[in-house]
Amino acid sequence: MTPQQLQPILQQGEGIMVEFKTARAELNRNVFESICAFLNRLGGSLVLGVQDNGTVVGVDTQQVDKLKSDLITQSANPQKLNPPFTLFPEVVVYEGKTLIYLYVPQSSQVHATRGVVYDRSEDGDLKITDQERLSQLYLRKKGFYTESKVYPYLHFSDFRAELFPKIRNLVRSNRPDHPWLNLSDEDLLRSAGLWRHDRQEGTEGYTLAAGLLLGEDTTIRDLLPHYKTDALLRRENLDRYDDRDDIRVNLVEAYERLSQFVQKHLPDPFYLEGDQRVSLRNKIFREVIANLLVHREYLSAYPAQLIIEPERVVTTNANRAVSHGPLDPKHFSPHPKNPVILNFFKQLGRADELGSGIRNVTKYLPHYTPGKKAQFVEGDTFETIIPYPRRPYPRSQNVGINVGINVGINERQIQIIQRVAQHQGAKVKDLQTMFDVTERTLERDMQVLREKNLVVLQGSKKAGKYQLTEKGKQLLEQTI
Protein backbone atom coordinates (compact mmCIF):
# COMPACT_ATOMS: atom_id res chain seq x y z
CA MET A 1 0.00 0.00 0.00
CA THR A 2 1.45 3.36 -1.07
CA PRO A 3 0.37 6.84 0.09
CA GLN A 4 -1.09 7.38 -3.40
CA GLN A 5 -3.19 4.22 -3.11
CA LEU A 6 -4.30 5.11 0.42
CA GLN A 7 -5.40 8.65 -0.45
CA PRO A 8 -8.72 7.76 -2.17
CA ILE A 9 -9.63 5.47 0.75
CA LEU A 10 -9.10 8.33 3.21
CA GLN A 11 -11.03 10.73 0.99
CA GLN A 12 -13.89 8.26 0.62
CA GLY A 13 -14.47 8.24 4.37
CA GLU A 14 -16.07 5.58 6.54
CA GLY A 15 -18.67 3.36 4.98
CA ILE A 16 -19.58 -0.27 4.43
CA MET A 17 -16.03 -1.08 3.25
CA VAL A 18 -13.92 1.51 5.10
CA GLU A 19 -13.33 1.94 8.85
CA PHE A 20 -11.02 4.34 10.71
CA LYS A 21 -9.62 3.82 14.21
CA THR A 22 -7.47 6.23 16.21
CA ALA A 23 -5.45 3.47 17.96
CA ARG A 24 -2.76 5.93 19.02
CA ALA A 25 -0.76 3.59 21.26
CA GLU A 26 -2.92 0.46 21.52
CA LEU A 27 -5.68 -1.26 19.61
CA ASN A 28 -9.19 0.05 20.17
CA ARG A 29 -11.36 -2.47 21.97
CA ASN A 30 -13.72 -2.62 18.98
CA VAL A 31 -11.06 -3.15 16.28
CA PHE A 32 -11.91 -6.84 15.99
CA GLU A 33 -15.60 -6.05 15.78
CA SER A 34 -14.83 -4.23 12.53
CA ILE A 35 -12.52 -7.01 11.32
CA CYS A 36 -15.21 -9.58 12.10
CA ALA A 37 -17.86 -7.48 10.31
CA PHE A 38 -15.70 -7.06 7.20
CA LEU A 39 -15.04 -10.81 7.05
CA ASN A 40 -18.75 -11.52 7.34
CA ARG A 41 -19.86 -9.00 4.71
CA LEU A 42 -17.90 -7.67 1.68
CA GLY A 43 -14.42 -7.19 3.12
CA GLY A 44 -12.91 -3.76 3.57
CA SER A 45 -10.07 -1.45 4.58
CA LEU A 46 -9.21 -0.72 8.22
CA VAL A 47 -6.89 2.25 8.82
CA LEU A 48 -5.35 2.92 12.23
CA GLY A 49 -4.25 6.46 13.05
CA VAL A 50 -7.31 8.21 11.61
CA GLN A 51 -10.25 9.78 13.45
CA ASP A 52 -13.85 8.94 12.54
CA ASN A 53 -14.18 12.20 10.58
CA GLY A 54 -11.16 11.34 8.44
CA THR A 55 -8.61 13.52 10.23
CA VAL A 56 -5.18 11.90 9.99
CA VAL A 57 -3.49 11.92 13.40
CA GLY A 58 -1.10 9.00 13.06
CA VAL A 59 -0.17 6.30 15.52
CA ASP A 60 2.66 6.47 18.04
CA THR A 61 5.76 5.54 16.03
CA GLN A 62 7.24 3.81 19.08
CA GLN A 63 4.19 1.52 19.26
CA VAL A 64 3.97 0.58 15.57
CA ASP A 65 5.63 -2.82 15.97
CA LYS A 66 3.42 -3.68 18.93
CA LEU A 67 0.24 -2.64 17.11
CA LYS A 68 1.17 -4.73 14.08
CA SER A 69 2.11 -7.72 16.24
CA ASP A 70 -1.18 -7.52 18.14
CA LEU A 71 -3.19 -7.49 14.90
CA ILE A 72 -1.28 -10.48 13.51
CA THR A 73 -1.30 -12.67 16.62
CA GLN A 74 -4.89 -11.90 17.62
CA SER A 75 -6.29 -12.52 14.13
CA ALA A 76 -4.71 -15.99 14.31
CA ASN A 77 -6.05 -16.64 17.82
CA PRO A 78 -9.41 -18.47 17.97
CA GLN A 79 -10.01 -16.94 21.41
CA LYS A 80 -10.11 -13.52 19.74
CA LEU A 81 -11.38 -14.30 16.24
CA ASN A 82 -13.25 -17.54 15.62
CA PRO A 83 -12.60 -19.12 13.22
CA PRO A 84 -9.18 -17.43 12.91
CA PHE A 85 -8.20 -15.59 9.73
CA THR A 86 -4.54 -14.57 9.80
CA LEU A 87 -4.10 -10.98 8.60
CA PHE A 88 -1.02 -8.84 8.01
CA PRO A 89 -1.07 -5.03 8.34
CA GLU A 90 1.11 -2.57 6.43
CA VAL A 91 2.76 0.65 7.64
CA VAL A 92 2.15 3.70 5.46
CA VAL A 93 3.63 7.17 6.03
CA TYR A 94 1.01 9.64 4.83
CA GLU A 95 1.70 13.39 4.90
CA GLY A 96 4.35 12.82 7.55
CA LYS A 97 2.05 10.72 9.79
CA THR A 98 2.52 6.99 10.41
CA LEU A 99 -0.60 4.93 9.69
CA ILE A 100 -1.32 1.21 9.80
CA TYR A 101 -3.38 -0.17 6.94
CA LEU A 102 -5.12 -3.55 7.04
CA TYR A 103 -7.04 -5.05 4.15
CA VAL A 104 -9.64 -7.55 5.36
CA PRO A 105 -11.08 -9.80 2.63
CA GLN A 106 -14.55 -11.26 2.52
CA SER A 107 -14.54 -14.70 4.11
CA SER A 108 -16.37 -17.88 3.17
CA GLN A 109 -17.15 -18.52 6.86
CA VAL A 110 -19.10 -16.74 9.58
CA HIS A 111 -16.74 -15.19 12.14
CA ALA A 112 -17.26 -14.08 15.73
CA THR A 113 -15.18 -12.09 18.20
CA ARG A 114 -15.55 -12.73 21.92
CA GLY A 115 -18.41 -15.07 21.01
CA VAL A 116 -20.42 -12.39 19.17
CA VAL A 117 -21.07 -12.26 15.41
CA TYR A 118 -20.89 -8.85 13.69
CA ASP A 119 -22.12 -7.74 10.28
CA ARG A 120 -21.29 -4.56 8.37
CA SER A 121 -23.50 -1.75 7.08
CA GLU A 122 -23.01 1.85 5.97
CA ASP A 123 -23.54 2.85 9.60
CA GLY A 124 -20.77 0.63 10.94
CA ASP A 125 -20.54 -2.70 12.77
CA LEU A 126 -23.78 -4.42 13.75
CA LYS A 127 -24.01 -7.03 16.51
CA ILE A 128 -26.06 -9.98 15.27
CA THR A 129 -28.24 -11.38 18.04
CA ASP A 130 -31.39 -12.11 16.07
CA GLN A 131 -31.47 -15.81 15.16
CA GLU A 132 -33.22 -15.22 11.84
CA ARG A 133 -30.62 -12.70 10.69
CA LEU A 134 -27.84 -15.02 11.83
CA SER A 135 -29.40 -17.85 9.81
CA GLN A 136 -29.55 -15.60 6.74
CA LEU A 137 -25.85 -14.84 7.15
CA TYR A 138 -24.99 -18.56 7.28
CA LEU A 139 -27.20 -19.28 4.28
CA ARG A 140 -25.58 -16.52 2.26
CA LYS A 141 -22.11 -17.89 2.95
CA LYS A 142 -23.09 -21.52 2.47
CA GLY A 143 -24.90 -20.82 -0.78
CA PHE A 144 -21.91 -19.12 -2.39
CA TYR A 145 -18.74 -20.63 -0.94
CA THR A 146 -18.23 -24.36 -1.33
CA GLU A 147 -14.68 -24.41 0.10
CA SER A 148 -16.12 -24.14 3.63
CA LYS A 149 -18.21 -27.34 3.39
CA VAL A 150 -17.52 -29.45 6.49
CA TYR A 151 -16.53 -33.10 6.12
CA PRO A 152 -16.99 -34.65 9.61
CA TYR A 153 -15.16 -37.85 8.60
CA LEU A 154 -12.13 -36.05 7.17
CA HIS A 155 -9.33 -36.67 9.70
CA PHE A 156 -5.85 -35.30 10.29
CA SER A 157 -4.41 -38.63 9.14
CA ASP A 158 -5.87 -37.92 5.68
CA PHE A 159 -3.37 -35.08 5.13
CA ARG A 160 0.17 -35.35 3.72
CA ALA A 161 2.38 -35.22 6.84
CA GLU A 162 5.51 -34.30 4.86
CA LEU A 163 3.85 -31.09 3.64
CA PHE A 164 3.93 -29.40 7.05
CA PRO A 165 7.72 -28.82 7.17
CA LYS A 166 7.52 -27.45 3.63
CA ILE A 167 4.68 -25.12 4.61
CA ARG A 168 6.64 -23.82 7.59
CA ASN A 169 9.71 -23.20 5.42
CA LEU A 170 7.65 -21.24 2.90
CA VAL A 171 5.95 -19.25 5.65
CA ARG A 172 9.29 -18.57 7.38
CA SER A 173 10.89 -17.29 4.18
CA ASN A 174 7.91 -15.01 3.63
CA ARG A 175 7.47 -13.81 7.25
CA PRO A 176 10.01 -14.95 9.87
CA ASP A 177 7.70 -13.84 12.70
CA HIS A 178 4.63 -15.67 11.42
CA PRO A 179 2.43 -17.02 14.26
CA TRP A 180 1.99 -20.38 12.49
CA LEU A 181 5.65 -21.20 13.14
CA ASN A 182 4.99 -21.76 16.84
CA LEU A 183 1.88 -23.91 16.43
CA SER A 184 1.42 -27.65 16.24
CA ASP A 185 0.29 -29.05 12.89
CA GLU A 186 -3.32 -29.38 13.99
CA ASP A 187 -3.38 -25.92 15.56
CA LEU A 188 -1.90 -24.51 12.35
CA LEU A 189 -4.84 -25.93 10.40
CA ARG A 190 -7.31 -24.40 12.84
CA SER A 191 -5.49 -21.06 12.70
CA ALA A 192 -5.69 -21.19 8.89
CA GLY A 193 -9.47 -21.53 9.11
CA LEU A 194 -9.46 -25.10 7.80
CA TRP A 195 -11.48 -26.48 10.74
CA ARG A 196 -15.04 -25.23 11.03
CA HIS A 197 -18.04 -25.57 13.29
CA ASP A 198 -21.18 -25.44 11.14
CA ARG A 199 -23.73 -24.06 13.57
CA GLN A 200 -26.57 -24.50 11.13
CA GLU A 201 -25.96 -28.20 10.40
CA GLY A 202 -24.60 -28.99 13.86
CA THR A 203 -21.44 -30.53 12.40
CA GLU A 204 -17.79 -29.69 12.84
CA GLY A 205 -14.58 -30.83 11.22
CA TYR A 206 -12.08 -30.14 8.50
CA THR A 207 -13.37 -28.40 5.39
CA LEU A 208 -13.15 -29.07 1.67
CA ALA A 209 -10.44 -26.36 1.56
CA ALA A 210 -8.33 -28.39 4.01
CA GLY A 211 -8.62 -31.54 1.91
CA LEU A 212 -7.76 -29.71 -1.31
CA LEU A 213 -4.77 -27.89 0.15
CA LEU A 214 -3.15 -30.76 2.04
CA GLY A 215 -4.91 -34.04 1.31
CA GLU A 216 -3.33 -37.30 0.27
CA ASP A 217 -4.07 -38.26 -3.35
CA THR A 218 -6.60 -40.88 -2.22
CA THR A 219 -8.26 -38.36 0.12
CA ILE A 220 -8.79 -35.89 -2.71
CA ARG A 221 -10.19 -38.64 -4.95
CA ASP A 222 -12.68 -39.53 -2.22
CA LEU A 223 -13.74 -35.90 -1.74
CA LEU A 224 -13.85 -34.90 -5.43
CA PRO A 225 -13.54 -37.86 -7.84
CA HIS A 226 -13.61 -35.49 -10.82
CA TYR A 227 -10.78 -33.22 -9.60
CA LYS A 228 -7.79 -32.71 -11.90
CA THR A 229 -5.72 -29.98 -13.51
CA ASP A 230 -4.37 -30.63 -17.00
CA ALA A 231 -1.12 -29.01 -18.22
CA LEU A 232 -0.62 -29.43 -21.97
CA LEU A 233 2.01 -28.36 -24.49
CA ARG A 234 0.59 -28.02 -28.02
CA ARG A 235 3.15 -26.52 -30.38
CA GLU A 236 3.54 -29.24 -33.02
CA ASN A 237 0.79 -31.77 -32.34
CA LEU A 238 -2.16 -29.38 -32.06
CA ASP A 239 -4.76 -32.17 -32.00
CA ARG A 240 -3.29 -33.96 -28.98
CA TYR A 241 -0.16 -32.70 -27.25
CA ASP A 242 3.65 -32.68 -27.26
CA ASP A 243 3.91 -32.91 -23.48
CA ARG A 244 1.42 -33.32 -20.66
CA ASP A 245 1.16 -33.35 -16.88
CA ASP A 246 -2.08 -34.81 -15.49
CA ILE A 247 -2.20 -33.25 -12.01
CA ARG A 248 -4.45 -34.81 -9.35
CA VAL A 249 -2.55 -33.83 -6.20
CA ASN A 250 -3.15 -31.33 -3.40
CA LEU A 251 -2.99 -27.62 -4.24
CA VAL A 252 0.38 -27.04 -2.55
CA GLU A 253 2.01 -29.59 -4.86
CA ALA A 254 -0.20 -28.74 -7.85
CA TYR A 255 1.19 -25.19 -7.76
CA GLU A 256 4.74 -26.58 -7.92
CA ARG A 257 3.94 -29.00 -10.76
CA LEU A 258 2.35 -26.24 -12.86
CA SER A 259 5.29 -23.91 -12.17
CA GLN A 260 7.75 -26.59 -13.29
CA PHE A 261 5.75 -27.19 -16.48
CA VAL A 262 5.82 -23.47 -17.32
CA GLN A 263 9.54 -23.20 -16.57
CA LYS A 264 10.21 -26.19 -18.80
CA HIS A 265 8.40 -24.87 -21.85
CA LEU A 266 8.30 -21.04 -21.77
CA PRO A 267 11.08 -18.49 -22.35
CA ASP A 268 12.33 -16.13 -19.66
CA PRO A 269 13.75 -12.97 -21.32
CA PHE A 270 16.43 -11.08 -19.44
CA TYR A 271 14.90 -8.04 -17.69
CA LEU A 272 16.14 -5.56 -15.10
CA GLU A 273 13.81 -3.80 -12.67
CA GLY A 274 16.02 -1.01 -11.38
CA ASP A 275 19.35 -2.75 -10.94
CA GLN A 276 17.84 -6.15 -10.06
CA ARG A 277 17.27 -8.98 -12.50
CA VAL A 278 13.58 -9.95 -12.46
CA SER A 279 12.12 -13.12 -13.94
CA LEU A 280 9.23 -11.85 -16.05
CA ARG A 281 8.06 -15.41 -16.62
CA ASN A 282 7.83 -16.05 -12.87
CA LYS A 283 6.22 -12.67 -12.15
CA ILE A 284 3.46 -13.32 -14.68
CA PHE A 285 2.81 -17.03 -14.34
CA ARG A 286 3.03 -17.03 -10.55
CA GLU A 287 -0.18 -15.00 -10.72
CA VAL A 288 -1.74 -17.03 -13.52
CA ILE A 289 -1.16 -20.35 -11.74
CA ALA A 290 -2.34 -19.02 -8.37
CA ASN A 291 -5.52 -17.65 -9.94
CA LEU A 292 -6.15 -20.95 -11.75
CA LEU A 293 -6.02 -22.88 -8.46
CA VAL A 294 -7.43 -20.35 -6.00
CA HIS A 295 -10.41 -18.94 -7.89
CA ARG A 296 -11.91 -22.21 -9.08
CA GLU A 297 -15.32 -23.69 -8.38
CA TYR A 298 -14.25 -27.13 -7.18
CA LEU A 299 -17.67 -28.75 -7.08
CA SER A 300 -17.85 -28.46 -10.86
CA ALA A 301 -16.61 -31.47 -12.83
CA TYR A 302 -15.06 -29.15 -15.44
CA PRO A 303 -11.27 -29.75 -15.30
CA ALA A 304 -8.89 -26.82 -14.98
CA GLN A 305 -6.46 -26.52 -17.89
CA LEU A 306 -3.20 -24.76 -18.68
CA ILE A 307 -2.42 -25.09 -22.39
CA ILE A 308 0.77 -23.76 -23.97
CA GLU A 309 0.00 -23.08 -27.64
CA PRO A 310 2.48 -21.84 -30.28
CA GLU A 311 2.29 -18.16 -29.24
CA ARG A 312 0.02 -18.00 -26.21
CA VAL A 313 -0.90 -19.70 -22.95
CA VAL A 314 -4.58 -20.33 -22.25
CA THR A 315 -5.94 -21.27 -18.82
CA THR A 316 -9.55 -22.18 -18.08
CA ASN A 317 -11.29 -23.19 -14.87
CA ALA A 318 -14.83 -23.66 -13.63
CA ASN A 319 -16.20 -20.43 -12.24
CA ARG A 320 -19.12 -19.03 -10.32
CA ALA A 321 -19.51 -15.88 -12.36
CA VAL A 322 -20.51 -12.49 -10.98
CA SER A 323 -20.27 -10.94 -14.46
CA HIS A 324 -19.94 -12.13 -18.05
CA GLY A 325 -17.51 -11.10 -20.74
CA PRO A 326 -14.00 -9.59 -20.89
CA LEU A 327 -12.67 -7.87 -17.77
CA ASP A 328 -11.03 -4.44 -17.91
CA PRO A 329 -7.93 -4.64 -15.67
CA LYS A 330 -8.27 -0.93 -14.86
CA HIS A 331 -11.92 -1.00 -13.84
CA PHE A 332 -12.87 -4.37 -12.44
CA SER A 333 -14.11 -5.31 -8.99
CA PRO A 334 -12.60 -8.61 -7.82
CA HIS A 335 -14.82 -11.07 -6.00
CA PRO A 336 -13.37 -13.86 -3.85
CA LYS A 337 -14.17 -17.41 -4.93
CA ASN A 338 -12.27 -19.30 -2.19
CA PRO A 339 -11.11 -16.78 0.46
CA VAL A 340 -9.63 -19.37 2.84
CA ILE A 341 -7.58 -21.01 0.09
CA LEU A 342 -6.47 -17.57 -1.12
CA ASN A 343 -5.41 -16.57 2.39
CA PHE A 344 -3.45 -19.84 2.78
CA PHE A 345 -1.59 -19.14 -0.48
CA LYS A 346 -0.86 -15.61 0.74
CA GLN A 347 0.81 -16.93 3.88
CA LEU A 348 3.05 -19.14 1.68
CA GLY A 349 4.02 -16.15 -0.46
CA ARG A 350 2.28 -17.62 -3.51
CA ALA A 351 -0.46 -15.03 -3.89
CA ASP A 352 -1.14 -11.42 -2.98
CA GLU A 353 -4.29 -9.45 -2.28
CA LEU A 354 -7.50 -10.17 -4.16
CA GLY A 355 -7.28 -8.68 -7.66
CA SER A 356 -3.49 -8.24 -7.62
CA GLY A 357 -2.99 -11.13 -10.06
CA ILE A 358 -4.65 -9.38 -12.99
CA ARG A 359 -2.92 -6.10 -12.12
CA ASN A 360 0.55 -7.72 -11.94
CA VAL A 361 0.06 -9.60 -15.23
CA THR A 362 -1.00 -6.32 -16.86
CA LYS A 363 2.06 -4.57 -15.38
CA TYR A 364 4.71 -7.05 -16.54
CA LEU A 365 3.30 -8.42 -19.82
CA PRO A 366 4.36 -5.38 -21.94
CA HIS A 367 7.97 -6.20 -20.98
CA TYR A 368 7.53 -9.94 -21.56
CA THR A 369 5.66 -9.75 -24.87
CA PRO A 370 5.90 -6.18 -26.24
CA GLY A 371 2.83 -4.97 -28.11
CA LYS A 372 0.55 -7.71 -26.76
CA LYS A 373 -2.19 -7.69 -24.13
CA ALA A 374 -3.53 -10.33 -21.80
CA GLN A 375 -7.21 -11.24 -21.90
CA PHE A 376 -9.40 -12.17 -18.94
CA VAL A 377 -12.88 -13.44 -19.77
CA GLU A 378 -15.39 -14.29 -17.05
CA GLY A 379 -18.32 -16.61 -17.51
CA ASP A 380 -19.29 -20.10 -16.37
CA THR A 381 -15.62 -20.78 -17.03
CA PHE A 382 -12.91 -18.20 -16.39
CA GLU A 383 -10.41 -17.91 -19.25
CA THR A 384 -7.01 -16.22 -19.18
CA ILE A 385 -4.97 -15.74 -22.37
CA ILE A 386 -1.30 -14.75 -22.06
CA PRO A 387 0.77 -14.12 -25.23
CA TYR A 388 4.43 -15.07 -24.92
CA PRO A 389 7.51 -14.14 -27.00
CA ARG A 390 8.61 -16.37 -29.84
CA ARG A 391 12.03 -18.01 -29.76
CA PRO A 392 13.73 -21.13 -31.10
CA TYR A 393 12.39 -24.25 -29.37
CA PRO A 394 13.98 -27.72 -29.46
CA ARG A 395 11.80 -30.28 -31.26
CA SER A 396 12.34 -32.48 -28.25
CA GLN A 397 14.69 -32.79 -25.34
CA ASN A 398 16.39 -35.78 -27.01
CA VAL A 399 17.17 -33.79 -30.18
CA GLY A 400 19.11 -31.21 -28.16
CA ILE A 401 20.92 -33.88 -26.12
CA ASN A 402 21.91 -35.88 -29.22
CA VAL A 403 23.25 -32.77 -30.96
CA GLY A 404 25.23 -31.92 -27.84
CA ILE A 405 26.71 -35.40 -27.59
CA ASN A 406 27.83 -35.23 -31.22
CA VAL A 407 29.92 -32.09 -30.62
CA GLY A 408 31.01 -32.95 -27.08
CA ILE A 409 28.84 -30.63 -24.94
CA ASN A 410 26.18 -31.34 -22.33
CA GLU A 411 22.50 -30.44 -22.05
CA ARG A 412 23.07 -27.32 -19.95
CA GLN A 413 25.63 -26.05 -22.44
CA ILE A 414 23.06 -26.54 -25.24
CA GLN A 415 20.64 -24.42 -23.16
CA ILE A 416 23.33 -21.77 -22.67
CA ILE A 417 23.72 -21.53 -26.47
CA GLN A 418 19.96 -21.06 -26.77
CA ARG A 419 20.00 -18.33 -24.11
CA VAL A 420 22.93 -16.51 -25.73
CA ALA A 421 20.97 -16.55 -29.00
CA GLN A 422 17.94 -15.18 -27.21
CA HIS A 423 19.94 -12.50 -25.34
CA GLN A 424 22.70 -11.43 -27.71
CA GLY A 425 25.19 -9.59 -25.53
CA ALA A 426 24.60 -11.64 -22.37
CA LYS A 427 27.16 -11.23 -19.60
CA VAL A 428 28.51 -14.01 -17.41
CA LYS A 429 26.62 -12.63 -14.40
CA ASP A 430 23.37 -12.57 -16.41
CA LEU A 431 23.78 -16.19 -17.49
CA GLN A 432 24.72 -17.25 -13.97
CA THR A 433 21.43 -15.80 -12.68
CA MET A 434 19.40 -17.46 -15.44
CA PHE A 435 20.79 -20.94 -14.73
CA ASP A 436 21.15 -20.59 -10.95
CA VAL A 437 24.70 -22.04 -10.92
CA THR A 438 27.93 -20.85 -9.33
CA GLU A 439 30.17 -18.49 -11.25
CA ARG A 440 32.87 -21.16 -11.36
CA THR A 441 30.50 -23.71 -12.93
CA LEU A 442 29.38 -21.24 -15.57
CA GLU A 443 32.98 -20.27 -16.33
CA ARG A 444 33.76 -23.93 -17.03
CA ASP A 445 30.76 -24.17 -19.35
CA MET A 446 31.79 -21.03 -21.23
CA GLN A 447 35.35 -22.25 -21.55
CA VAL A 448 34.10 -25.46 -23.21
CA LEU A 449 31.89 -23.47 -25.58
CA ARG A 450 34.75 -21.12 -26.48
CA GLU A 451 37.09 -24.05 -27.12
CA LYS A 452 34.45 -25.57 -29.42
CA ASN A 453 34.24 -22.18 -31.22
CA LEU A 454 30.51 -21.95 -30.44
CA VAL A 455 30.60 -18.62 -28.56
CA VAL A 456 32.98 -15.70 -28.47
CA LEU A 457 33.55 -13.17 -25.68
CA GLN A 458 33.62 -9.58 -26.86
CA GLY A 459 35.36 -7.30 -24.36
CA SER A 460 36.88 -7.99 -20.96
CA LYS A 461 36.09 -11.06 -18.85
CA LYS A 462 34.08 -9.03 -16.30
CA ALA A 463 32.35 -6.49 -18.54
CA GLY A 464 32.41 -8.38 -21.84
CA LYS A 465 29.43 -9.90 -23.60
CA TYR A 466 28.98 -13.28 -25.29
CA GLN A 467 27.87 -13.74 -28.88
CA LEU A 468 27.29 -16.87 -30.95
CA THR A 469 29.81 -17.70 -33.63
CA GLU A 470 28.70 -18.92 -37.05
CA LYS A 471 29.37 -22.46 -35.86
CA GLY A 472 27.24 -21.79 -32.78
CA LYS A 473 24.39 -20.51 -34.94
CA GLN A 474 24.59 -23.59 -37.14
CA LEU A 475 24.48 -25.84 -34.07
CA LEU A 476 21.46 -23.95 -32.78
CA GLU A 477 19.63 -24.59 -36.06
CA GLN A 478 20.13 -28.35 -35.57
CA THR A 479 18.22 -28.21 -32.26
CA ILE A 480 15.18 -26.47 -33.76
Image: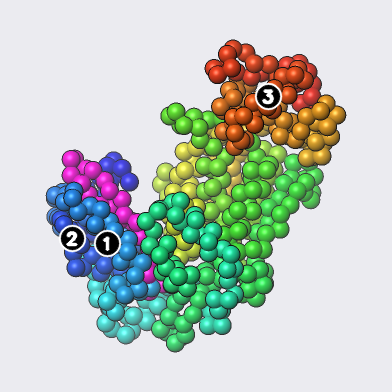
Q: Residues within 10 Å of mark 3 (few under 14, many from 20)?
A: many
* SS category of the residue bearing label 3: helix
> Tag 2: residue type?
Glu
Q: Residues within 10 Å of mark 1 (few under 14, many from 20)?
A: some
Q: Is residue 119 above or below residue 388?
A: below
Which residue is at 50% across, 76% downward?
206
* SS category of the residue bearing label 2: loop
Give left or right: position of 233 versus 154: right
Of the image marks 3 and 1, the number of the one nearer the N terminus: 1
CA separation, marks 3 and 1? 53 Å
Whether pointer 2 and pointer 1 mark residues with C-beta atoms closer than 8 Å, the reply is yes
> Tag 3: residue type?
Met
Which residue is at 53% across, 30% downward?
271
Q: Is residue 473 visible?
A: no
CA separation, marks 2 and 1? 9 Å
Q: Residues within 10 Å of mark 2 (few under 14, many from 20)?
A: some
| Place of residue 122 in the rendered image (x, y in percent of width and height, measured from the top left) | 24, 64
Of the image marks 3 and 2, the number of the one nearer the N terminus: 2
Q: Which mark is residue 26?
A: 2
Q: Is residue 200 above or below residue 233?
A: below
Q: Which mark is residue 70?
A: 1
* SS category of the residue bearing label 1: helix
Please tell me in which quadrant of the rendered image residue 371 appears.
top right
Residues in magenta, as a range: 84-111
Whether pointer 3 and pointer 1 mark residues with C-beta atoms closer than 8 Å, the reply is no
Q: Using the image as rendered, state which of residue 173 and residue 48 is in the foreground.
A: 173
